[in-house]
Image (tube, grey):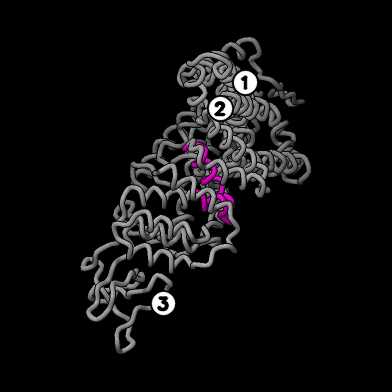
């Protein structure tokens, strides 16, 4: 009987909606009254055009939201309740058409849901409802809803759904959904009884590289004859497709990881590579940018209450929603740069300025500052990680030929490119960049020419710290933010700068991308993230033994170099 219901639903789905004369509310109301007459109930709900009104009513019925109301001097009446409750927890009664259900005085009847009996359904009726709901989803105006409906029908592999899928195939215009419909049809045809149809379906699935069909094809491959051979051939093609998908997926993940390393290492390339300062607190500049993003998100959302050192600090809430809330990250990006830059300037004025040309002392001092800042983060925001939610325009992913590209990682890659171009233009095309390059090449000569080297040091360190803050803002969109966030990237950032060549921005770019690609590739090949990172580190050590100056050697006319 279940297959019969599905077949009827498919046929009705293919009929033009104009051929239906009964409204969804009328049909469902009559069906609810036909208690214990499943065949008639199914016939009624299948006599209605499968539009959104029918979907809403059937969903409400399945969830127990339709009640049979018995009122004196009235026949049983199917009703539903509105969403508003009064002080007595009562809700207004509505007819299934949406009109208020009123008493003799014309006043809307208000009822307690707990006092009512929900309209019952049995397994056959629920199966018929599911068939209609699934099939109605094929014509949904929302693209994602149509895609989900097609995938559900395909994985169900019910041959009675083939007519509806073929009708949708002739009407669909979206290229991705068309491909999924073809896959769903082929998957469903695997359950037919005709060997030739099964062979054709196997070939279609193999040509499509259908990853979802592997289990079904493996079951057929265990049989014998032409169908088994066709299934085995399809599985070979799918395996080849999987190799391609994994390769491109690994390259994308490596590129995104390299971009994260690049953004994190660019600031270090300025402070360590150009200034020669070993700043072990650089990771905490990254954490400052990430926490700034978190604070901005809370201001746009529910607000934030902090109590560091017993002091109560309250950040107001804008109670933003929709596009206004999603714009918080646009505001957080420059604020992350500014906050980290100010923290870097304070560090340079209070500590670093006294330790130039004293690398060991600067390393120890900034390591102490790093520990102090980590503890400050714990006292202010707590020891646990805080969650930064991605705005909707950075959520989700784009799938191309089964390769999933996360929007947040695509954004990091794009913005890393923009930051590299910006830093290059700053150093090569602006007066500040000219002063920075002059001081880095020969500090004494620049001072003799009237350059205020202390101010240049201050601005350069602020720039490097601000870039680290940008890295923190981007990292907040990929993972959680915690007190030790910076420590997770400081070692990789130093390795990136050293491998690329101390003082070389272009070397930092190539090094970051190379390390990211190597890390992800080895993890994919070995299937062990820890072993992959160990091999990357070993490779870096061997490379530096062969080329201690890195990929790009920075040459200078300074006698100090």
Asked if the magenta segment contains residue 152, the reply would be yes
Residue 358 seen: no
Q: Which residue is mark 3?
A: 99
Instruction: Please rate how many residues cluster around mark 2, counting C-alpha atoms within 10 Å: few if below 14, some from 14 to 19, many from 20.
Output: few
Image point (65%, 26%), residue name: 207
Residue 143 seen: yes
Q: Secondary structure under badge 1?
A: helix
The answer to whether 131 is drawn above or below residue 530 in the figure is: below
Write down the region rendered in magenta. Answer: 135-156
The answer to whether 483 is drawn above or below residue 518 in the figure is: below
Asked if the magenta segment contains residue 508, the reply would be no
Image point (31%, 51%), residue name: 122
Q: Secondary structure under badge 2?
A: loop
Q: Earlier in the sequence, mark 3 or mark 2?
A: 3
State how far apart marks 3 and 2 are (Cα): 51 Å
Q: Which residue is mark 2?
A: 194
State how far apart marks 3 and 1 are (Cα): 57 Å
Q: Nearer the viewer, mark 1 or mark 2?
A: 2
Residue 449 in the figure: left or right of residue 88: right
Q: Secondary structure under badge 3?
A: loop
Q: Which residue is mark 1?
A: 237
């Amino acid at each position: 009987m279940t297959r019969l219901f599905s077949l009827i639903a498919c046929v009705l789905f293919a009929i033009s909606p104009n051929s239906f004369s009964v409204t969804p509310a009328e049909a469902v109301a009559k069906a609810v009254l036909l208690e214990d007459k499943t065949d008639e109930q199914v016939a009624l709900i299948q006599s209605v055009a499968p539009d959104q009104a029918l979907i809403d009513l059937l969903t409400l019925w399945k969830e127990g939201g339709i009640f049979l109301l018995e009122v004196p001097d009235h026949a049983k009446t199917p009703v539903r309740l509105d969403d508003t409750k009064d002080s007595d927890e009562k809700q207004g009664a509505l007819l299934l058409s949406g009109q208020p259900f009123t008493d003799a005085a014309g006043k809307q009847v208000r009822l307690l849901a707990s006092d009512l009996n929900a309209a019952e359904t049995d397994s056959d009726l629920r199966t018929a409802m599911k068939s209609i709901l699934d099939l109605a989803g094929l014509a949904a105006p929302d693209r994602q809803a149509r895609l989900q409906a097609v995938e559900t029908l395909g994985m169900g592999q019910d041959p009675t759904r083939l007519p509806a899928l073929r009708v949708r195939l002739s009407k669909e215009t979206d290229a991705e959904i068309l491909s999924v419909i073809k896959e769903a049809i082929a998957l469903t045809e695997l359950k037919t009884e005709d060997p030739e149809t099964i062979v054709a379906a196997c070939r279609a699935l193999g040509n499509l590289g259908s990853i979802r069909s592997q289990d079904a094809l493996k079951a057929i491959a265990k049989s014998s004859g032409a169908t088994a051979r066709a299934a085995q051939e399809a599985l070979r093609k799918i395996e080849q497709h999987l190799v391609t998908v994994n390769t491109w997926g690994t390259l994308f993940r490596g590129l995104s990881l390299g971009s994260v390393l690049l953004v994190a290492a660019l600031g270090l390339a300025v402070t360590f590579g150009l200034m020669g300062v070993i700043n072990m607190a650089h990771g905490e500049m990254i954490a400052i940018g990430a926490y700034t993003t978190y604070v901005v998100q809370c201001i746009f959302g529910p607000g934030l209450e902090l109590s560091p050192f017993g002091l109560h600090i309250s950040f107001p809430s804008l109670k933003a929603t929709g596009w206004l809330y999603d714009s918080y990250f646009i505001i957080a990006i420059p604020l992350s740069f500014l906050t980290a830059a100010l923290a870097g300037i304070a560090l340079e004025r209070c500590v670093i300025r006294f330790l130039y040309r004293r690398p060991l002392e600067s390393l120890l001092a900034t390591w102490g500052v790093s520990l102090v800042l980590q503890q400050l983060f714990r006292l202010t925001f707590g020891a646990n990680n805080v969650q930064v939610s991605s705005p909707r325009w950075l959520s989700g992913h784009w799938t191309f030929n089964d390769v999933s590209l996360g929007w947040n990682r695509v954004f990091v890659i794009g913005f890393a490119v923009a930051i590299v171009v910006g830093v290059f233009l700053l150093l090569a095309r602006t007066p500040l960049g000219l002063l920075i390059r002059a001081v880095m090449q020969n500090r004494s000569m620049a001072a003799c020419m009237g350059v205020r080297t202390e101010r240049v040091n201050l601005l350069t360190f602020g720039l490097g710290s601000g870039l680290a803050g940008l890295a923190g803002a981007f990292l907040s969109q990929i993972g959680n933010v915690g007190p030790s966030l910076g420590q997770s990237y400081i070692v990789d950032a130093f390795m990136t700068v050293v491998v690329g060549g101390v003082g070389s921005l272009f070397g930092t770019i190539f090094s970051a991308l190379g390390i990211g690609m190597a890390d992800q590739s080895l993890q994919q090949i070995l299937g062990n993230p820890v072993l992959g990172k160990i091999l990357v580190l070993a490779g870096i050590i061997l490379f530096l033994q062969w080329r201690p100056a890195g990929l790009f050697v920075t040459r200078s006319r300074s006698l100090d170099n």
